[in-house]
Image (spheres, rainbow, N blue to C red):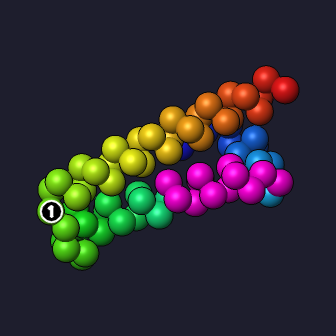
């Protein structure tokens, strides 16, 4: 995710607790979605879609955070 910000992500994960929470939650949702789609974890298609929307919203927040941090 966002390879152009790889160094900034590493720096923020070490110093910005809010960013770290967003990033970790995004990764947790990503894994949960993969498990549901692989039928490792039971879920309805509606539940999967809700998680995908939540994950996308987190990705938008992460990107906004990265852009703001990159401009300072």
- Tell me residue 41's x, y (percent): 25, 75
The residue that mark 1 highlights is 44
User: Which quarter of the figure has residue 64?
Assistant: top right
- Tell me residue 70's x, y (percent): 77, 29
What residue lies at 36% left-to-right and 66% top-to-bottom?
32
Q: Is residue 50 left or right of residue 9?
A: left
What residue lies at 24% left-to-right and 76% top-to-bottom?
40
Q: Is residue 23 magenta?
A: yes
Q: Is residue 10 magenta?
A: no
| Residue 29 can be seen in this image | yes
User: Which quarter of the figure has residue 21?
Assistant: bottom right
Stretch in magenta: 15-26
Rendered position, 71 above or below 19: above
What residue lies at 19% left-to-right and 67% top-to-bottom?
43
Q: Is residue 42 left or right of residue 67?
A: left
Q: Quadrant of the C terminus?
A: top right
Rendered position, 50 above or below 35: above
Residue furthest toward the top? 71
Q: Main secondary structure of the magenta part?
A: helix
At label 1, counting other C-alpha atoms closer than 10 Å, the crowd grade (few under 14, some 14-19, many 20 or more) is few
Q: Secondary structure at mark 1?
A: loop
Rendered position, 62 above or below 10: above
| Residue 13 can be seen in this image | no
Report how many numbered discs are placed on residues in the image: 1
What residue lies at 79% left-to-right and 23% top-to-bottom?
71
């Amino acid at each position: 995710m966002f390879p152009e910000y790889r160094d900034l992500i590493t720096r923020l994960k070490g110093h910005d607790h809010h960013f770290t929470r967003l990033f970790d939650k995004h990764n947790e949702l990503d894994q949960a979605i993969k498990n549901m789609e692989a039928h490792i974890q039971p879920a309805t298609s509606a539940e999967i879609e809700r998680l995908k929307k939540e994950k996308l919203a987190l990705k938008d927040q992460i990107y906004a955070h990265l852009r703001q941090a990159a401009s300072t």
